[in-house]
Amino acid sequence: MLEAVVVPDRVGVEGLEDKWAPDWEEHQLHAFDRTAPREAVFSINTPPPTASGSLHIGHVFSYTHTDVVARFQRMRGAHVFYPMGWDDNGLPTERRVQNYYGVRCDPSLPYEGDDFTPPHRGDAGSVRAADQVPVSRRTFVRLCEELTTEDEKQFEALWRYLGLSVDWNHQYQTIGRRAQKVAQTAFLRNLERGEAYQAEAPGLWDVTFQTAVAQAELEARDYPGHYHSLAFHPVGGGDDVVIETTRPELLAACVALVAHPDDERYAHLFGTTVTTPVFGVEVPVLPHPAAEADKGSGIAMCCTFGDLTDVQWWRELDLPTRSIIRRDGRIVDDLPSWIETPGGIAAFNDIAAKTTFSARAAVVDALRESGELLAEPTPTQRKTNFFEKGDKPLEIVTSRQWYIRNGGREWQREDGTVRDLRKELLDRGEELDFHPDFMRVRYANWVGGLNGDWLISRQRFFGVPIPVWYPVKDDGEVDWDTVITPDEASLPINPSADVPPGYTAEQRGEPGGFVGDADIMDTWATSSLTPQIAGGWLEDSDLFERVFPMNVRPQGQDIIRTWLFSTVVRSHLEHGSLPWTDAAISGWILDPDRKKMSKSKGNVVTPLDLLHEHGSDAVRYWAASARLGTDAAFEVGQMKIGRRLAIKVLNASKFVLQAAPGAPISLDASAVTAPLDRALLAELADVVDGATTAFAGYDHARALELAESFFWTFCDDYLELVKDRAYGRGAVAADGEPAELDEAEIASARATLWLALDVLLRLFAPFIPFATAEVWSWWRGGSVHQAAWPTSEVLRTAAGDAEGDGLVGLLGAAGEALSALRKVKSEAKVAQRTPLLGVELAAREEAVEHVLLADGDLRAAGKVTGSMTIVVGEPVGADGEPVAVAVVSSTLGEAPPRGA
C-alpha cells in the first residue's frame, strides 16, 4: 500500500520549474556518488558552452538530448557523473569584452592597477574599434574573467530552469587554474615525447585578429576577384609566357612558374628561367603534378605565399622564401633584396606599406603602363579561405608557431623510425561508437584529409599561456630553438610574469637572461582535455579512476573535426585510449528557411522567453522529439504539443488517483484479472521493452515516441472504457440501473490504472521532468527521478499469457468500437451522455472476440442501455479505408438533462 494521495484541486504546468528545480538542488538529487565503482558509473563529457554572450535555442536542443540520457541512466541505477564546464577563453570572449567595456588589449602598456574603471559596462552597446581604450594585458584579462563570471551565472540559471540534471558541485572553466594546469602539463608531456614542436613556417593568418589559424578553423567562402593576364619573358628570348592570376599584388613575391609535367605546351621551358613583369626578377619554370593544365593558361606563378598550393610547391620544389605581406595584411616597408632593376625598385616603392587591395591596384596600373597586362581584368568568383570568425580572406605569412602532431604530416622520430599516427587515429575512430553511426565517416574523412599538424599557438591574450621561456643570447638575440620548461609541480605558470628556474626577474629581456613565450594555446587545445579537467586528472586520482575513460561525448556534428578529433588525439597520446566509448552527435536547428541557426548568421532564437511562454517541459519535448544526427526545424507548434502532453499527464493522473476516493492505492499485479486490463498492461510491457532498448541505443526520440503513442491511447480509449468500472459502476441497463460489478472487476480496473500510471510517469520522467515530479509527489514518496526505470516483468505477470489468451489487439479493437459509438452521437450532434437504445456493430473477424471481451466496459462507456449486437463484416471508415469496427445501425434515446 502507498502513502495517502493528496491531489491539488487545480493542476497546471505554470510555476513547476520554480517549485522543483530548487527542491532538486536542496536534496542534491543529481549529486555524483564519489564511492561508486567505475563499472557502476555513467560519466558524461558535457560540452562547455562558450561563456560569451547568450545561449540560443540550439544549445537547449542539444543539451536536452544529453539530459534525457543522463536521467535515463540514473533511473537505471547508474551513478551519473554529469559536470558542467564553461568555455570562457579565446577570441569570442575577447571580442565581447572589447564591445562590452569599450577597451582593447595593448600588451606593451604597463598595468593600470586594480582600481582601473573601464569606460563602459555594456551601456554603450558595441563600441567601434577606433573608440576602444587601450589597456594592459593584465587589465584586459581581468575584465575577461569578470565578464565571463557574470555570463556563467546567467547560463547556469537558464540551465536550471530548463531542468538539466547537472551535478552543479562539479563545474570547471577552461581558463580556470585546474584547466590551466591540465593543459600546460599535457603540453609539456607532448613536448617531452616529441609530439609537440615549434617551427618557423608559412601558415594561415588572420590580418584582422592578428593570429595564426588552424586547418580546422577554416571556412571556404566565395569572394569576388578578377583574372589578370600577365606576360613573363623567357631569358634568352622567345615568346612570352602568359599566366592568369587573381593576385597580381603578389608579383613581387614570385619565385617560380609551375606547369604540369605532362603539359606539352611548356615542356620546352622546364629548366629554363623567365623574368617577372614590372619587377624584372629571374625565376625558374618547373614541373609539378599539382599544376592544373586545364585551369587558365595551364601555367601558374608560385608566390610566397598566395595559397596553400604555393606552400606545397615551395616545400616540394625547394624554392626560396620571398614574403612581402606583413602580419597586418600590408606590404612590407623595406625593399626586398631580390628586386634590383630600377623599374622594379620604383614599382615596389609604390606599393610598400599599402594594403593588399591598394597594392593590387598599383601593380595593375604598372602592368598596364608597361604593356605586360595583356587584357583588361575579367571578373570572377573564387573560393577563398576565411577564419571562421573573420571577415577578410586569410593571408599566408611565415611565423614561429607551436604544433601538436595529429597525423597530418609524416612523423619521423629521433631514432629514425616513422610513426603512422594518422592510421592510429583512424583506428581509434573505428573503436568509437558513433550515434548515429553514419557520423563515423565524417571523422574518417577529416583525419584522412589532414595536410598538416595541429597548430595550437595563438597570438591572442585571454587563454592558457604556452608554458615555456627562451634564453636571450649575450648579443641580445632570442634563442628560439632552446626551450626552457618549468617543473610540473610549479604549474600553472604565466611565462610573461613568472620567472624560469635559475633566473631572476631582473633578467627578463636582458642579454644573458630570458623571455617568456607570449602566445596562448588555441581554445581547442584546452577543450580537447575536458575529460581530464572535469575528471580531476592530476589533482583527484580517485575521481579520475572512477570516471575515465568516460561513457559518452555529446556534441554537434559541425565540431567533429575540431572538438571530437582533438580530444581523441590528446587522449590517445597521453593515455593510449579513447577518451570515451560513445559519441552522441546532435543535428542542427533550422530556421523557417531551412538554414542552420547560428549566431554568425543572426537567425538564432534566445530560449528564455520560449521557456517562460510554453514551459520547460514543452521545450524539452520539442528537442527530445528529434533523433540524434537529424536536423530539426524550429517549431513552436511542437512546443505547443509538448505543453499539451504535460498538461494531459497532470489531468489524466489526477483522474487516475481520484478514481477510488478513500481507497488505499496498491500496485498489486495479482489484482489484474479483466481481459481489457490485461491487454493494456501487455501492450505497456512492449512499450517499456521498446523504450528501454531505444534509450540504451541513444535513440531517445524513439523512446519518447513509444511512450507518447501509448499514453494517448491510454487516455483516449482505456480511461474512457474503464472509467465507470473504476468508479464501481457497471453498464446502464434499460431501466436506468447500473449492472452489478463484482469487487474483482473493480479492483482489476483500479490496479491497472495505478500500475500504468506508475510506469508512464517513469517513462516520461527524462523528457518532462517537472510535470512527472509534480504528479509523483501527489502519491509517492521520494522523487520520480530517483525511482527505478520501469521493467516489463511486473506488467507481464499482471497480463498473464495475453497472446495465448487472444488478448493481443483487444485494446485497439475496443478503442475503435468506442470511437464508432461516439461518432454516432457526434454526427447526430447530441451529447455523449445520450443513451444508445440499440446498436449493431460490424467487425472484422479477428476483432469480434475482442469486442465481446470488452462488452461491459464498452456498453458503460458508450452509454448503451439496450441491445448491442456484433456481426462479422468488412467495415470501412468514412474515407473508405478498412477499419476494425464500425456501427451498422443504432437508435438514440433522449439525452439526460444537464447536470443529471
Image (cartoon, rainbow, N blue to C red):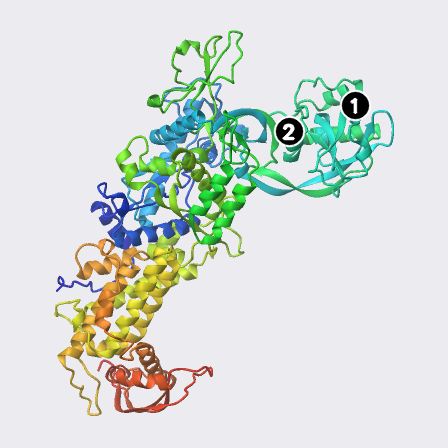
Question: Element under label 1?
Answer: loop
Residue 235 visible in the picture:
yes
Q: Are the residues at dot 1 and dot 2 in contact (C-beta closer than 8 Å)?
A: no
Q: Residues within 10 Å of mark 2 (few under 14, many from 20)?
A: few
Q: Residues within 10 Å of mark 1 (few under 14, many from 20)?
A: many
Decide which of 669, 383 is in the foreground and name it: 669
* Residue 272 left/right relative to 600: right
Please tell me which residue is depicted at 43% across the width and 9% down the height of the picture: 507
Q: Position of residue 375 (x, y in %)?
A: 82, 37
Question: Element under label 2?
Answer: helix
* Residue 467 left/right relative to 795: right
Residue under label 1: 280
Above or below 122: residue 690: below
The disc placed on residue 315 is 2
Above or below 361: residue 31: below
**Which quadrant would residue 340 be assigned to in this image?**
top right
Decide which of 683, 755 is in the foreground and name it: 683
Q: Amino acid at mark 1?
A: Gly
Q: Amino acid at mark 2?
A: Arg
**Which quadrant would residue 716 be assigned to in this image?**
bottom left
